[in-house]
Every structure is written in structure tokens, then in C-alpha cells.
Image (cartoon, rainbow, N blue to C red):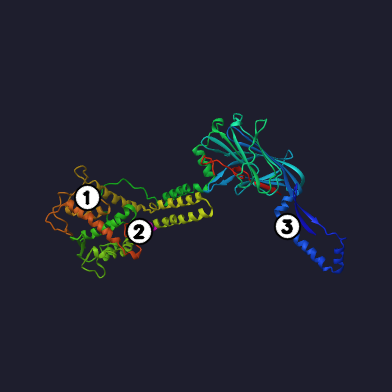
Amino acid sequence: MTILLARSPVGIRIIPMRTNALNPAVANARSQDARPVSTNRRRAFLCVTLSLLLFPSLLATASLQIEDFAVDIVMDISGELVVTENITVLFFTPHHGIERFITISEKTPLGENVSIVLRVEEILKDGVPEPYTTRVSGNARVLRIGDPDRTITGVTRYTIRYRVQRALLFSDNAIHLYWNVTGNDWDVLINQASAHVHLPDSVDLTAVTRVSYSGYYGTSAQQHLGTVTGEGELLFESGPLYPGEGLTLLITVPREILPISPPSFWQRLVWFLSANWSASLPLVTLLGMFLLWSKRGKDPKKRVIAPAFAPPRDMHPGAAGVLIDDRMDLRDVSAMLVGLAVGGYLTIGELKDANYTFSRQKPADESLSPAEQALYDALFGTPPSETCTLASLEQKFYKSLPTIKSRVFGELIDAGYYPSNPERTRGFYRGIGGLALPLAAYLGIQSTSLILGISVALCGVVVLAFSRVMPRKTVKGVRKLEEVLGLAKYIGLAEVDRIEFHNAPDKEPQHFEKLLPYAIALNLTAIWTKQFEGLLREPPKWYTGATPTPSLNIIAFSHALSTMNRRMERTFVSAPRTSGKSASSGRSTFGGGFSGGGFSGGGFGGGGGKGW
């Protein structure tokens, strides 16, 4: 037996051809040897098996075909569509019914999902309600029509009626109905297809531009231009459509004769977010990080800040600077150095070549904190030398910075001011935010969605932004911060000519020097020194200018301090280039638009179907 695949008017059929047993040649072959007959039977069996495996679509086509696919589309004045599909099916073999899947979401080249709202109203078989199930699979609404306990053959007419919202496209001067009538994903022959379109009565059909496209997906050659019937509707027709071919129509109506308002910005935003859930990820991340900050990053509430005339007890200038902004700045290190000088551990001398010398006055003792001890050792070494210059610390001091920072944070944690290291807390969230950026690129490429990639990247940006405020103080830490802020308030508003503080100390040289390191840490050096203009007669004992003078010019001294601090900050982080260190301080209704031109398979609607 051989297999013949032939295309008939009702599709592709499998025709078995039997060998004539009366053929003398065949009879002679049988009489001579029975083995070739057995071989022929095996070959025939293999042919049938291969046909079943390699040509399932042909067999499916042969089992049924669509005699007529007639669609009625009614547009009301609100822009909603009522679509009625009348599908006449010829079943050659027993089937339960058909499956119809209608596309409800499409993806633009940028990865934006554009969706319609589809609500099934009625499904009939030969005019009688027929059982069906509905589900969403991927980007389609799937309708399985028929009774799983019964099968049918012959000609059957199915009526599928549903309502559609968001199917109109808007340009500046026109409204467009771009609708895929049959869909291009049927695996059976459609003998003929047609579409009747009913526009609102106010529309003058002679002013309407219309065209249809039929063929395989992407075919842009214009076919039937649509005719105006006596009933005042537009009719589009096509000839036979083979599996993979479809009928699509495009109707353009001037805005002035079809007064349908385009969706508002907020409507489009809601539609966009409902179809593109990933676009809401940054908002969800923002809300989540805010709640996380409120619970785990927000400091306890501060009380009213009262001026403080003395430094915080048991806290050196560097720790006070950290408590202000939860970070260890180079300014804090400079303040600690000046604090060592004020404490009598070293002197500072300005040289004529814009360099500075540090001279050791007494050894480090138990009164120094671990961080101050680390700074002292970084300056003079172990065993300590008697002097060093700022220039000699270049490309060396940076190695000691991690130790100094670590000890400052350790002191604050041990004192109960922080539950954990602020630097590590920031680093944790920075790491999460940083990982989101390559993840965004990967997901955007894998999903072919620019929107998803941008959304994930913005999530990373949100986490990075919150990383700055996630370090949290304890209640004890906030109380200590209140003391530091009180001192900052006093220093910043200590213009006694305008503001009188109750029980404020006299402006004595000792008071000036005692608060100077804290003024440096709080970035209030210029304000603090200005308050003593005309009151200080001699320079501090721990400081010698490039040109020693018997009297002190407080403005010049303030400028010299600022210059020294800037120079120290640059030196503290200077590193060889080889170290790798930095030498610096710390398609769519949503858019409301339409661009002309269409093709078969474009627009809303579409999908396909099959028998089951």
C-alpha cells in the first residue's frame, strides 16, 4: 500500500492505493518469493508511521476545515466593540468541538505590553447555547467550545459573541480600527472569510478610509478595499485562507465625524501598569524601602536641641563628626589631628614650601581612644619618631585610614550609639543596588523587554539612594547626637553681639582651642574663628606659622587652618597609581498615537484556533 497526499476542494486528504492482485508481474513475484511481499508491507507501515509523525498539521487539516468565517463588528459611540464571529466548520472525523484563542495582549518592539479588555457574552452551536471553558494562556484568551462527553461530525455553525474595550488607536486627526478578523494561527483551511463593520450612525462612510490585508503574517499588499453595503455598513471579503493566512482590516475615521475622546493620561497610565506589571516595580521598591527605612533605618526621634557650650563627654572630634552624618570623612581625621595638638601630644609647624611638620611632644597614653592611638601611630610610626612632615605621609598614610575608620566605628558601637557599623550597612544596600544593574541588562535581553530592564535598573537606583540613610542610631546614640547638635548650634550662632546664651562661657583662648577641633569636624571653622576676632592676642602654642609673629591675626589663622585641612585631606588619601586607589575624597494605545501602514496579522484581535 502507498500513501498519496492530495489537496482536494475540502482540504488535504490521505488516499490509500492498493496494488492490483491480478497483475501478472505481481503474481509472478509472489509465486517466486514471499519475502519481497513481506518487505513491501513493512515499507508501507513505515510510510504510514512517518506520515503520522512528520505531517500532523496535514492530518489535522484533513480532519476538518472552516467553510465560512463571517464576523460582525459593531462600534458604539463610546468606542466599545461588539464582535460576533460566525464560524461554519465541516468536521470530517469525530470532534468534541473547536478551540478559539483570541490575542488580548501584544508586545511592542520596546517590550511594552499593550492589552485589550475582552468579555465573552455568548457562545452558540447551531443557534443553541454550547458549553465552553475559558482561560488565559500566554497573551491569548482561549475558548474551548464543546462537550467533552460528546463528539460531532458534519457541518456545524458556531457563534462567538464578545465585547472589546481599548481596541481603538488615536492619532492627531483620526481614529483607527485596526482589527485582525480571523487570526493567522489557524492550522486548518478557511474557504472564505468576511467582516461586516457597523460604525456609529453619525459617521459618513464616504469620508472613511478603509483597506484590508490577507495572506501570511506580515503581508502588506493591500487587498479588498471594503465596500459600502445598502445597510450602511462596510464589508470586507477574502478568498480561501490556507493555514497561517488571515484577514486584517484597517479603518480610519476623521476625528471630527467620530467624536470619541482619547483616553486621559491617568487612564493610559492605569492601562499601561495593568499590562506592564514590571513598570510598577520601582514604585513597589520605593514603597518597600521606605517601610524598611521606617522600621530599621530611621533614627529614634530627637528632642528639642538646646545649645551646648562644651564638647560631648568622652567623645573625640572624629567620633562627633561621624555621629552627625553616619560616615567618617577626611575632615574628621583632620579634626582628630588638631585635637591631638590641642591635647599637647604634638605641635604643628607651617613651612614656607606649603608643607607642614608635626613634632611629637609626649607619648600616647591611656587617655587617647583606640582611633586616636591609631592616628598617632600613623603619624610617627612604631617605634615613634620625633617629627614627620605632611609630604612624607604621601602615598603612605592611606594605608592607615581603614584602621582609623574601623576603630572610630568600633568605639561608637561599643558605646551603644549604633547597633552595627554604618559603613557596612551602607555597603550592604549598595551591593544590592549595584547587583540590580547587571541583572536589569540580563533580564531586559532575555525577555526582549526594554521596560523590564529599565524597571529593574530603577529599582537598583532606588536601593542605592536609600543606602545613604539606612544606617541607624540607637536611642542612646540619638541622645549623644543631641549633644553634638547642641554644640553645633552654639558654635554656629555664637555671635554674642546678636544672640546672648544663658550661662555661656567667656571667650577665652582655652575655650577657643578646646572647641576648635569640633568646629573643624562640624565644618564650622570659619564661623568659630571669626567669633574671636580681636580677642586672641597670641597664636596657640601648638601652632607655628611660616612667618612667626608676636601677635595673632585671627583671619589669617583661619585661612591657614583651612589651607592646612585641605592639604591634609589630599595627602591622607594619596596613593600610588598601581594600588588602584582613588586619590580623591571620600505598538500602543498607551502612547495615544498611530503611524500609518498595516499588514496581515497586525492590529488587535487575531489569534487562531483548531479542533479538539
Q: Residue at 16% x, 59% y: name it.
A: 546
Image quarter where the N terminus lies is bottom right
Name the one closer to the observer, 290 or 514: 290
Q: Residue at 20% x, 44% y: name it.
A: 496
Q: Position of residue 465 (x, y in %)?
A: 40, 51
Tag shown at residue 528: 1
The answer to whether residue 150 is seen in the rendering is: no
Q: Amino acid at mark 3?
A: Leu
Crowdedness near tag 3: few (<14), some (14–19) or many (≥20) residues, C-alpha within 10 Å: few
User: Residue extending furthest left?
Assistant: 550
Q: Is residue 421 shown in magenta?
A: yes
Q: Which residues are magenta?
A: 415-424
Name the one closer to the observer, 259 or 467: 259
Q: Is residue 432 shown in magenta?
A: no
Q: Position of residue 291 (x, y in %)?
A: 44, 48
Q: Amino acid at mark 1?
A: Trp
